[in-house]
Amino acid sequence: MQTVDIPALQDAALSALAAASSSKELEQVRVAVLGKKGSLTQVLRGMGEVPKEQRASLGALVNVARETIEAALAGRAAELAEREMETALQSEAVDVTLPGRTRTIGSEHLISRLTREIVEVFRGIGYRVVEGPEVETEYYNFTALNAPPDHPSRGLQDTFYVRDRSGTASRVAGESEVLLRSQTSPVQVRIMEEEAPPIYILAPGRVYRRDVADPSHLPQFTQIEGLVVDEGISFAQLKGTLEYFCREVFGPERSTRFRPHFFPFTEPSAEVDVSCGICGGAGCRFCGHTGWLEILGCGMVDPNVFGFVNIDTTRYQGFAFGLGIERIACLKYDVPDLRMLLEGDMRFLRQF
Ligand code: DAH
């Protein structure tokens, strides 16, 4: 038999293994070297013909070659298998990521924002914010505000009374001294009871009335009460203060006017109107063809109210005002129906 150069065969096999670029090619190399008719297998088969004295050394050489080749084969096989797995994973991968969730950014409700803006206007000229209870007594909501005992707003028709389970004998069944405040004005009384002048306060809060919701009425809404008690306070200061407030909130292009009115707790009293934002004062449906929209009530604190809280009227004077935020919101933004503020319709709310 011709002599085979085993180291050369081994080197050739190793480089063929290294060059194999797929499992399939690797298998072809394996068959060519170690298969039934493979180059190394043939050497093993021909061992019988090798002269006896050479057989042991050749056998050792062949065994080393076989082990080396088999080890290299196993290593290369693992390498290729891993690479092929990776390629398969990459090419067959399915993208299961979901689109991110967009967070909708909330915004302050128009009423909260406007309340804050109005509070800021008055804070800027030295007013302090105070609060009073929403469940009030008849004394603070009416009596101490100089409302006559037979005033219609005291009636069950207009005010929500809290049922009195103790059943005070002198009262109509179901009526009690406890009620849901119908205005923020009782806060005036509470503050004047507790504090000595000078007083410059603003009291925002919810009020309740027995009204059916319609374009211009709500059974629950938000008011801001203002009260000033100091020495030398005049109607001129009330006027200047409220004109400043109107300009800040409605802008310089809308004018204001003071109209005499009556409130039990102020004397003299007035209502303030702002020119209609829709017709500019010419008259339209929104303003009832008057060109004006009423925005607040105000006046000089009635001496009778000072009497209830023991403030010396020879030394102090005061003015007060009260406004409805929902109403102001509608008049500022030309909204025709108060109820739109409460419906939570995002198409409406997003505009502010
Ligand atoms: N409390 C009145 C109302 O709800 C508004 C008001 C008018 C408040 C005149 C005042 C005021 O402080 O002086 O209709």
Image (spheres, rainbow, N blue to C red):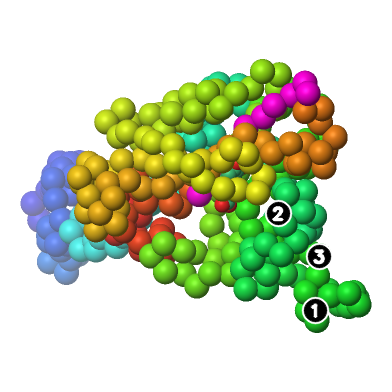
Residue in the image at 44% along x and 26% along y: 244
Residue in the image at 61% along x and 68% along y: 158
- Kind of residue at disc 1: Val
Instruction: Please report whichever mark, 2 or 1, sits nearer to the chain's N-terminal start.
Output: 2
Please provide percent x and percent y for residue 236: 52, 23
Q: Secondary structure at mark 3?
A: loop
Q: Are marks 2 and 3 in contact (CB under 8 Å)?
A: no
| Highlighted range, magenta | 314-324
The answer as to whether callout 3 falls within 8 Å of ligand 1 is no
Q: Does the stretch in magenta take in 336?
A: no
Of residues 126 and 148, the one drawn nearer to the viewer in this rendering: 148
Please provide percent x and percent y for residue 338: 40, 60
Residue identified by numbered label 1 = 172
- Kind of residue at disc 3: Glu
Q: Secondary structure at mark 1?
A: loop
Q: Is residue 132 left or right of residue 167?
A: left
**Label 3 neighbourhood size at 10 Å, few (<14), some (14-19), many (20+)?**
some
Q: Secondary structure at mark 2?
A: loop
Tell me how far mark 2 sits from mark 3, CA to CA.
14 Å
Instruction: Please report whichever mark, 1 or 3, sits nearer to the chain's N-terminal start.
Output: 1
Residue identified by numbered label 2 = 147
